[in-house]
Amino acid sequence: MLFNFHLGFWAMLFWLVWGHFVADYPWQGDFVAIAKNHNTPVGKMFWKWVLPGHAWIHAGFVAFFTGHVGLGVVEGILHALTDRLKCNEKLSINADQTIHIVCKVIWAFWAVFILD
């Protein structure tokens, strides 16, 4: 188990959403946003590394704040799949972000009420 803050639900949710926005906006940057998309010229070369790398940054935040690597792994997989659907224009940016935030609500619930 990683570090576990033993936070309540709302505090856990706060930190998970904070981590999401840090990882999805300032830490993502233009290169990652373009290179994770297999439909862009740069993405055609790099997406197989950049998309999982981006998703694993999110996974790390979830694992760190919840103290559960398993939740981080599930986050990484779902984040990558959601972003892939957005890159394929199957999801809008609003749907993409809603899915990501709903996942954080689920991880906070599991970490606080189920796993601990």
Image (tube, rainbow, N blue to C red):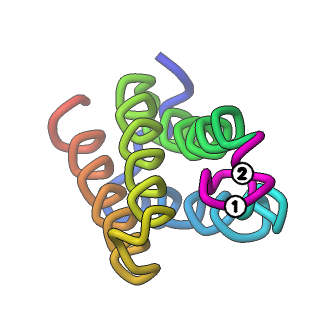
Q: Residue at x 66, y 51 (%)?
A: 36
Q: Are marks 1 and 2 in contact (CB under 8 Å)?
A: yes
10 Å neighbourhood of mark 1: few (<14), some, or many (≥20)? some
Relative to 4, is 113 on the left or the right? left
Q: Residue at x 47, y 57 (%)?
A: 83
Percent x, y of residue 69: 45, 23
Mark on residue 40?
Answer: 1
Percent x, y of residue 115: 22, 29
Q: Residue furthest top?
A: 1
67 within the magenta span: no
Mark on residue 94?
Answer: none
Q: Quadrant of the C terminus?
A: top left
Q: Secondary structure at mark 2?
A: helix
From which residue to which does the magenta span run?
A: 35-45
Mark on residue 43?
Answer: 2
Residue closest to the eye, 100 or 109: 100
Q: Residue at x 67, y 58 (%)?
A: 23
Q: Residue furthest left?
A: 114
Relative to 116, is 4 on the left or the right? right
Residue closest to the eye, 41 or 22: 41
Amino acid, disc 2:
Gly
10 Å neighbourhood of mark 2: few (<14), some, or many (≥20)? many
Amino acid, disc 1:
Thr
